[in-house]
Structure formats: structure tokens, C-alpha cells
Image (tube, rainbow, N blue to C red):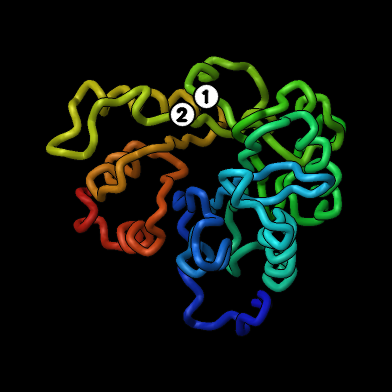
Amino acid sequence: MLFGNAPQANATEPTPLPNAHAHNDYYHQRPLLDALDQGFCNVEADVFLVGDQLLVGHYRWELRRDRSLESLYLAPLKERVAANDGHVYPQPGRFVLLIDIKEDGAKAYAALEKLLAKYDDMLSVTRDGKHQQKAITVIISGDRAQKEIAQSNPRYVGIDGRVSDLDSDAPSDLLPLISDNWNSHFQWKGNGEMPAAERAKLKKIVDQSHAKGRLVRFWATPEKPQVWAELNQAGVDLIGTDQLEKLAEFLNAPPTETNGR
């Protein structure tokens, strides 16, 4: 595994965790790298368009020229994919790069589209109506230029949908993910048992999404093993966290240690 100054892949290579999602990944000491060291298969980066560059940060005052989407994520991922025979990890599997455009959606997407074309060899793409799955699937959240994205050909991204899109007939490559605020749909915060009605609601959302080939994610979920266990058991595909090591430890634990997983 060639990755900056990282050593070649060896026995310490982490087990890929398909539903581990690094929320606001860029806040970690080593963006992307810390998540990869824990086996995360989903990372999230917020971006702003500054000039012709997409810079990473949650607020404009955090932005720096040396922290671009390309330098922190796309370039190192390309190096890693090249070293792992077309995959992010030696073991093949899905990897999602969730890009949250904070403002100026259409302009930012136009710049992003040009940037992603440079990484055609590793990005899932829909070209002339035919979808090709590759090492990394890019999904756009935040200020989503939905019309512009849908009209792109080739199209290197999908759109992050909402629970209100559960009945959408959009193809799964255009709408690959259903995301929403946990607190908009559930009252349970991880204290005591999850109410049966809320557990059933969660399962229904997941089942409806999966029936149309879409992944599921909630943001603002409480950072508690009890909540992770319910999400995992319901089949939520992207379990978001700011606590990389704790979620990795939870997901790597035997089933008896994760509330019946």
C-alpha cells in the first residue's frame, strides 16, 4: 500500500468496515488517513468553492489553500487505489466519498465535475445511461445541484436523498443514498430500550431504501454503543461518528458484545 510515507500493506492492514462512516472526516489529525487506519469505508468532506478550488472545511473561516478536496482526498485515494489493484483496501469492497457542498451548489458542482474527470479511472461513473461501479462512489450532499447533476454525462456523482425521497423512482446510481437528521424522525437518544414503534420505523426506512438499491445514513445520531447497535441491527449502511476508534472497536467486536449483532 503506497500512501504518502506509509509503509507497504502488511499484516496490520485493518479489516474494512463497510458501514463505518467518518463524519466531518477533515477534523481528524490526519484527514482520510486516520479513517483508513481504522478500516472505514465511508468518509465525509465539506467543501467551499474559492476561486477555482474546492477547499475543505465546515466554515469559511477554517479554509486554507493547502487543504483542498484534491490534496486531502482525491490524490491520496488515487495513490492507494493504484497500489491495491483498483481498490481502496486490498480486500475489494464499496467505498463512499460523501462531499457536502456548503454553498453555491451549482457553481461548486461545475468545478467539482471538472476535477473528478481527472480521476475517471477510480470513480464510479454513469456514461450514456450505463453505470460502471469502480473503487470509489462519490455522493453529493448539502447544497445539491440536483438538476445539473442529473444532466451530467458522464456523471461521476450521485445525489444524497432524504427520507422524503423514499418513493422516488430515480435510478439508484443517481440517488444512491437516503440521509436524514436522526432527531427529525426519532426521539430515542440511546437511554434504555429503543421504543418498539421507533425500531419498526427505522427498519421500514431501511427496507424501503434497500428495495430501491439505496444506502441509508442518519446524521446527528447519539454517539453511544446502544444506538450503534440498533443502527447496525436495522441494516443502516453508513453509521456516522466522530469517534473513529470507538466505532471501529464496536464493529469489530464479536456479535455477543454488540447487543446481539
Q: Could you say which disc has been placed on residue 178 in the image?
A: none
Q: Is residue 116 above or below residue 82?
A: above
| Location of residue 231 with respect to 135 vertically, above or below | above
Residue flagged by tag 1: what amino acid is it?
Arg
Foreground residue among 148 and 28: 28
Where residue 92 sits, quadrant-wise, is: bottom right
Q: Is residue 116 left or right of residue 173?
A: right
Residue sitting at x 85%, y 37%: 154
Residue situated in front as seen by the camera: 83 or 66: 66
In this figure, which residue is indicated by the disc labeled 2? 180
- The quadrant of the image that shows the N terminus is bottom right
- The residue singled out by tag 1 in the image is 162
Residue 112 falls left or right of residue 203: right
Is the residue 258 above or below the residue 200 in the image? below
Asked if disc 1 and disc 2 are in contact, CB closer than 8 Å, the reply is: yes
Residue 51: x, y in percent? 82, 45
Secondary element under disc 1, as helix, strand or loop, is loop
Residue visible at 71% across and 46% down in the picture:
133
Count neighbours of disc 2 (C-alpha within 10 A) and say few if under 14, some if 14 to 19, many if 20 or more.
some
